Image (cartoon, rainbow, N blue to C red):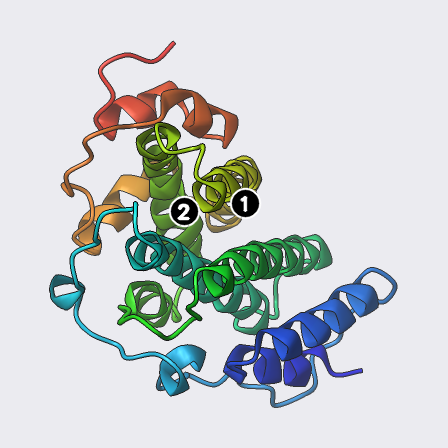
């Protein structure tokens, strides 16, 4: 079985059921077999994200402002934005396996398992979106995560630093505040369901960031680099001084960050 061909199909597809089926095939195979890379394999550089066929892609500044969550459309804009992040994260997790075939089997299994989680997250959110009368693609989106993957395609250490240890970790900072904002409307059934989904995603994303942390540190050791290179990488991608109104100290610690790192990212206290 050529998992790289299957991963490529999964990454290219805009159909969540196709992604789910192909990802499950890859995980089952990797759990039972050692993966060999065929001679001459060269991963493609994808010119556009898989969702380009169903979504209108705009610059982040051009995204419409979210409306009040009291209306189905207002709540749907929030659900859609989170669902889109999860859909994007599926492709990034699969690409982490597809693009770096030299990595160990445990690495491959880790990121395919992450993709399985992201697929489940997306399907939960898509189900809620449909209950509200909408579907993925009904609102404009940006391609920030796809762009980050493309910019780091040449360097796996950069990829582990930027995608799980920056973008996904930033999600850990934001999620509790989104949930808190929704709490006073929990009695509305769709809002209550969204809060439940977000709590599941939040807990599982800690594990995803931890996996990224583990492989970042593994690569630093393999390349003979200090883990402080993380901040050099953030600076190189112009991410070091991005405004962080909140740093989730406990979640980041659980996900492998040290207190020194957490304070450098803006937390006033960490112990």
Mark 1–mark 2 Cα distance, whole angstroms, equals: 8 Å
Q: Which of 94 and 37 is in front in this view?
A: 94
Secondary structure under the numbered disc 1 in the rendered image: helix
Quadrant housing residue 107 = bottom right
Residues at badges 1 and 2 in contact (C-beta under 8 Å)? yes
According to the image, label 1 marks what residue?
208
Q: Is residue 249 above or below residue 1?
A: above
Circle 1 packing at 10 Å, graded few (<14), some (14-19), many (20+), is many
Residue displayed at 21% across by 56% down: 237
Q: In this view, does 85 lie above or below 205?
A: below
Residue that protrudes farthest toward the bottom in the picture: 40
Residue that protrudes farthest toward the right in the picture: 32
Q: Can residue 199 be seen in this view?
A: yes
Q: Position of residue 253 (x, y in %)?
A: 45, 24
According to the image, label 2 marks what residue?
168
- Quarter in which the C terminus is drawn: top left
Residue displayed at 20% across by 35% down: 244
């Amino acid at each position: 079985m050529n998992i790289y061909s299957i991963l490529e199909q999964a990454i290219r597809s805009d159909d969540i059921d196709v992604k789910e089926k192909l990802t499950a095939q890859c995980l089952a195979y990797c759990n039972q077999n050692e993966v060999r890379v065929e001679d001459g394999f060269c991963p493609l550089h994808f010119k556009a994200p898989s969702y380009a066929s169903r979504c209108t892609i705009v610059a982040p500044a051009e995204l419409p402002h979210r409306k009040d969550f009291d209306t189905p459309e207002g709540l749907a804009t929030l659900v859609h934005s989170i669902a889109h992040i999860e859909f994007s994260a599926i492709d990034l997790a699969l690409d982490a396996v597809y693009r770096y075939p030299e990595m160990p089997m445990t690495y491959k299994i880790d990121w395919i398992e992450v993709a399985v989680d992201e697929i489940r997250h997306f399907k939960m959110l898509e189900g809620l979106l449909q209950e509200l009368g909408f579907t993925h693609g009904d609102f404009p989106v940006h391609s920030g995560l796809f762009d980050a993957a493309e910019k780091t395609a040449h360097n796996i250490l950069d990829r582990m630093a930027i995608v799980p240890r920056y973008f996904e970790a930033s999600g850990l900072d934001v999620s509790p505040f989104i949930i808190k904002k929704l709490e006073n409307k929990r009695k509305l059934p769709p809002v209550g369901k969204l809060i439940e989904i977000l709590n599941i995603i939040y807990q599982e994303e800690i594990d995803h960031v931890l996996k990224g942390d583990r492989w970042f540190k593994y690569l630093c050791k393999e390349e003979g680099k200090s883990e402080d290179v993380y901040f050099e990488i953030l600076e190189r991608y112009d991410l070091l001084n991005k405004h962080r109104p909140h740093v989730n100290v406990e979640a980041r610690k659980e996900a492998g960050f040290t207190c020194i790192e957490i304070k450098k990212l803006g937390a006033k206290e960490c112990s």
